[in-house]
Amino acid sequence: GENETIQTKKISSHEGFTVLRLRPELPRDRRRNVHKILSGGGSQRRDFETVTISNYPLNGGLDSQIDCNNNENATTTAIMVHWSNKALSSLQKKRKRKNDYDADANSSNKADESITATFCVLRKEQVEHQAAVQHIARALKCNQQDIGLAGIKDMQAITYQFCTLRSINIQRAERANHALTGKRIELSRFEEVYDFLLNRGNLIGNRFEVVLRNLKRIERMTSKTENGATVWKERTIPCVASHLDAMVKRVREFGFVNFYGEQRVGDAGHSSRVGVRSYDVGRAMLRQNFAQAIDLIMTGRSYGIYHPGDDEVKAREIWKTSGGNAKATLDAFPKSSSTMVRERDLMKGLVRYGDPLEAIQCVPRNVRMFWIHSYQSYVWNIVATERIKLWGLHAKIGDLYEVSSFEQDGTKSDNINVVEEPDAVSIYQVVLPLPGYNMKYPSNEIGALYNKILENDGVNLNEKCNIHEATAKGSYRKLIQKASNLKWEKVCECTSEGEDPVIDAVQLSFELESGCYATMLLRELMLTTMAREGKISAP
């Protein structure tokens, strides 16, 4: 399972501002994260301003009616939150628009009332993010833009995440569950909120619980051929508790390479085996070859690793044999509107506009950006691999590293500097740029590698393009990442070997910052790759 971390303890509302009491034991770095998310996460849009209040009463203070089981004199750190002037101005303009969203209580038509929303928890099981949003929008009879989510959760998991439903009251949200029956989607824990909507980028982190079964260790052996050559062989042997302890301790102490996972870049392996991947589409878009991007999307993944229904296979085949006839392809699509969601939007766009770019613009913006981000992530992964090969876990002259500073209100500001004295910089400060416009690159061999990769791919990211679907905004990402609260517990034991029992199944639990992938932590824990080619024999 996967769910989002909660930072605050109690909330008190007052005229013009809100006070958030924090848990007394909350670490300072987590408090900074709360400031950051409330003030806009470092983006140009800053809806809230925050002020830290020290020694704030846990019981009483500005809101004496809040119950607390603690000592009457107990205090904690609190955060005072109020709207920024820019946000208030923007809010007033939105309320004057004629095409405001329809609210159940008619609040959107009254200039003196707040934006209301229902805050809830979204649970989904093996449902792709965009498909889940579409199902919820249909069940609520609302626009997809009314559904606020802080991040995208993996399809291959049972996931929980916070959700806001703009201008939807609790009763209407509860009724939506009837329409969601059988779709492995559920809304629960409803609460009415005012002037609060979740958006992409609001996520602080995720908490994971992962069960690993049929655990085995891999033992490597060598043998000599007749001509004296060394041959490596592998076989599986039982996994014992001491080995598992050592593996978990290693990852806990040293972390893992912060690669983007397969969910972002596509399946591992040669393209002849796995077919089209997300980054292939993104690369075509950044080249402004939108017709090729559509053709790649319609070609899809290899049927060797993906097993679609007959209707989907037929639709893709018609696209291929008809020379890209969008009308004929659309007529052959599966009847279920939850199947081939992106492809359906593209074909409708081509039928309506006839222009590949305008067809791609018919796909939701977050999906279009995902394809571009996928290519950026693919480049980042290649560069990170070469960086580790060259210099391992040591900072080198010319690397980039992050230095954090904090404003008086507790918000975090990250400054990117060039390493001049490697011994003074930790590997955990070293960052690599996600390629995009207005980015600083390493001044060593790694900077040259970025240029080589982009040039070979025919992609120019140095300048911002006036076509949103052909431009990429960059960022910086830590090379090495650590998990918080990483631990394991046995699910069952097979047999015992002395005092070191054999572990057949285990549950791992840990927390990761936003944007980090649990699969990459597991990859490091298991000392494996995402596409293992070697054959392993049984013991």
Image: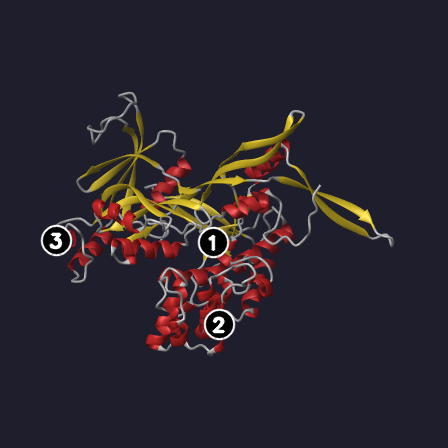
Mark 2, other Cα within 10 Å: few <14 / some 14–19 / many ≥20? some
Query: Residue tagged by mark 3?
Result: 110
- Amino acid type at image mark 2: Glu
Q: State the residue at coordinates (34%, 55%).
A: 133
Mark 1 or mark 2: which comes first in sequence? Answer: 2
Contact, CB < 8 Å: mark 1 with mark 3? Answer: no
Mark 1 or mark 3: which comes first in sequence? Answer: 3
> Is 449 left, or right, of 297 in this rendering?
right
Disc 1 from disc 2: Cα separation: 41 Å
- Measured as percent of width and height from the top left, residue 216 is found at 63, 40
Q: State the residue at coordinates (29%, 23%).
A: 69
Disc number placed over residue 476 in the picture, else none? 1
Q: Nearer the viewer, residue 76 or 355?
A: 355
- Amino acid type at image mark 1: Tyr
- Measured as percent of width and height from the top left, residue 14 is found at 19, 38
Query: Residue tagged by mark 2?
Result: 317
Mark 1, other Cα within 10 Å: few <14 / some 14–19 / many ≥20? many
Q: Residue furthest front?
A: 310
